[in-house]
Image (cartoon, grey):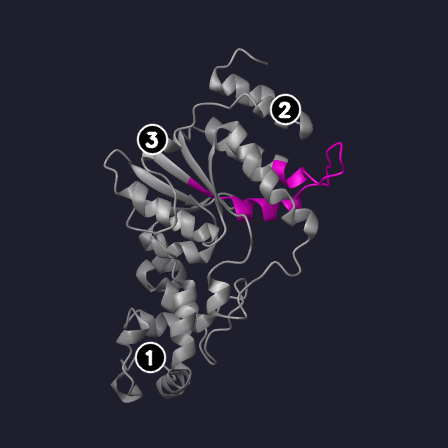
Amino acid sequence: MDVHLIDGTYELFRYFFAVPSAKDATGQEIGAVRGVLGTVLSMIDAGATHLGVATDHVVESFRNDLYAGYKTSEGVPPELLSQFPILEEALQAMGVVVWPMTYFEADDALASAAVKAAEDDRVTQVLICTPDKDLSQCVKGTRIVQVDRRRNIVRDEAGVEEKFGVKPESIPDYLAVTGDSADGYPGIAGWGAKAAAAVLSQYPHLEHIPKDWREWAPSIKRARALCESLFGSWNDALLFCTLATLRLDAPVFDSVEDLRWKGPGPEFESFCQRLRAQDLYRRVSEKSGSSKV
């Protein structure tokens, strides 16, 4: 079996800004929820049998306690934030396993689920469905891959190395020095993508980098400036690396069989009525083999 792990936060943001506004009878915005449910169904239509969706039930996480500048919900439209609990309930009603994260982030749940699923011999491949570069650190050979469904790109370990110039294991170190504007930390002054790739392809982790620039590989340009900048901001670099490192102990599933889609629950019909998505209800019911239309 293949296991599909879906970044519900990314999908909800994507649909919020991509589809027209739609409201239920109470005036609650629901357009993005309908979009995500539709994309999950399209994956089931395409043959996905074992699925899990991770969401950021709240944007803030334990990383906000580590670094004051880490991303928050400030500036996120309330019409978007208000759809997270609706999406989570709707997915559950649809029969799809969902992990709403509060202490951890959705990315931690995806990472935890990917590693756990890959340990099961029955699993052929784990597909992490998100373009988020943080998740590139979880890619392993061709067994755990990252999928950008919007651009139709599947990235295995060789693909990660081609894109970033470093192996998956070095992605947290790469992000630590280059920074991640989406997550709110700036990286290290003077370190861009090319410099990070040049250094970390030689020394996979920050702790492996010689403190004396004269010991660096001669192929690395601007070695002195990069070395002085890195070790002059060493504590920041280690902190940013911690922020970029995904946790593997988020609560997800007990058995990969828990992820098998078996059809919607009885409450799914009322959810579809609320979402004004009767066609979605019909399609899901037909797909599950239900007699209800």
Which mark is in front, 2 or 3?
2
Name the kind of residue labelled 3 in the image: Glu
Q: Earlier in the sequence, mark 2 or mark 3?
A: 3
Q: Earlier in the sequence, mark 1 or mark 3?
A: 1
Spot occupied by residue 40 in the image (x, y as percentages of width and height): 51, 34
Residue 220 image label:
1
Q: Residue at x 48, y 66 (%)?
A: 65
Query: Does the magenta segment cover residue 23?
Result: yes
Name the kind of residue labelled 1 in the image: Ile
Q: Earlier in the sequence, mark 2 or mark 1?
A: 1
Q: Residue at x 43, y 58 (%)?
A: 134
In the picture, which quadrant includes the N terminus? top left
- Is label 3 in a helix, a strand or a loop? helix
> In the image, is residue 293 above or below residue 130?
above
Of residues 248 and 229, the one drawn nearer to the viewer in this rendering: 248
Q: Which residues are magenta?
A: 5-33
Q: Is 213 left, or right, of 72 in this rendering?
A: left
Query: Does the magenta segment cover residue 140?
Result: no
Residue 17 visible here: no
Q: Which residue is mark 2?
A: 270
Residue 28 visible here: yes
Q: Which residue is mark 3?
A: 257
Dot 2 and dot 1 residues touching (CB under 8 Å): no
